[in-house]
Image (cartoon, grey):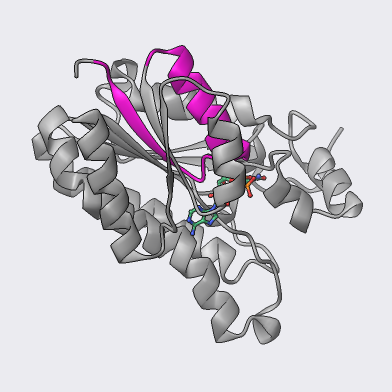
Amino acid sequence: MTQKTAIVTGAARGIGLATTRLFLAEGRCVAMIDRDAEELIRVAAGLDSVLPVICDVSDPAQVDEMVAEVTDRFGRIDALVNNAGVADFGPIEQTDFQRWRAVMETNLDGVFLCSQAVTQALKETAGAIVNIASISGLRASTLRVAYGTSKAGVIQLTQQLAIELGEYGVRANCVAPGPVDTKLALAVHTPEIRAAYHDAIPLNRYGSEEEIAQMIVFLCSDKASYVTGQTIAVDGGFQATGVGLPALRT
Ligand SMILES: NC(=O)c1ccc[n+]([C@@H]2O[C@H](COP(=O)([O-])OP(=O)(O)OC[C@H]3O[C@@H](n4cnc5c(N)ncnc54)[C@H](O)[C@@H]3O)[C@@H](O)[C@H]2O)c1
């Protein structure tokens, strides 16, 4: 098969689905990975050139089976987008070990397991990995003891991958989205939080799924052939605001 391929985890909705659509528009075949079987099958039924694979990225055996199935069908893997993620916000005293582990299992273990499982295939194509972190991995905040820590881990893991795999021509980069209107954000952002974000973000709005997908697809493409080990915030300027006190505004 000469057509380029990509694996996108968490592809049944949100940023993962938007990324899948953009890859397809650029002529790639896409393996859509999700643990939400019903939604994945429903969404994939309306798309050409996709291979839906039901898989929990936090389970090593399921990840190995998923990569075997994708390799069998596509014959090559050119990109891996580690996008599957969960958000569970709460103060440290209410974040019991089970909640902590549930966040780490998907957000950090899943990125490690999928990256490790495709390393050999990516070496063969000099392919690319793009991991999805968050501004919560760059800037600490209340209620994000688990989520923010998992995403900071993803940023460091991206650098580890870039350094170790660079000599094989494999690139690894990270996208750190600001708030995006998806089911994940709707579940943890109250109307008050939404208003406060609008106020704090220089572009005064949430991002769209497509705006995040554009950066992911760019980083996977040959246009980014000399970019590796980087974290790009796609956040309307939020990361750049520094002190950012409302009282300092003119
Ligand atoms: N939406 C935001 O505001 C925002 C901001 C910063 C970062 N992010 C990150 O972007 C990524 C995508 O978020 P989204 O907003 O599109 O979320 P979403 O909840 O809309 O979609 C996430 C998808 O991942 C799947 N998933 C979750 N855990 C999984 C697992 N263990 N195995 C397989 N599939 C799994 C879900 O079933 C779902 O289809 C996440 O990593 C998230 O942390 C989102």
Q: Position of residue 166 (x, y in %)?
A: 15, 39
Query: Left or right of 112: which side holds 182?
Result: right
Residue found 39% across the figure and 59% down from its top: 110
Residue found 42% across the figure and 61% down from its top: 108
Q: Quadrant of the C terminus?
A: top right
* Vertical side of 146 occupied by 57: above or below: above
Is 211 in front, or is 160?
211
Is 187 in front, or is 233?
187
Q: Position of residue 220 (x, y in %)?
A: 35, 27
Residue found 37% across the figure and 65% down from its top: 59
Q: Quadrant of the N terminus?
A: top left
Query: Left or right of 76: which side holds 31?
Result: right
Q: Quadrant of residue 154?
A: bottom left
Q: Position of residue 121 (x, y in %)?
A: 16, 39
Residue found 20% across the figure and 15% down from its top: 2
Query: Left or right of 94: which side holds 62?
Result: left
Q: Specify whether residue 203 is in view.
A: yes
Q: Specify whether residue 247 is in view.
A: no
* Vertical side of 239 occupied by 151: above or below: below
**What is the span of residues highlighted in magenta in the rendered image?**
3-27
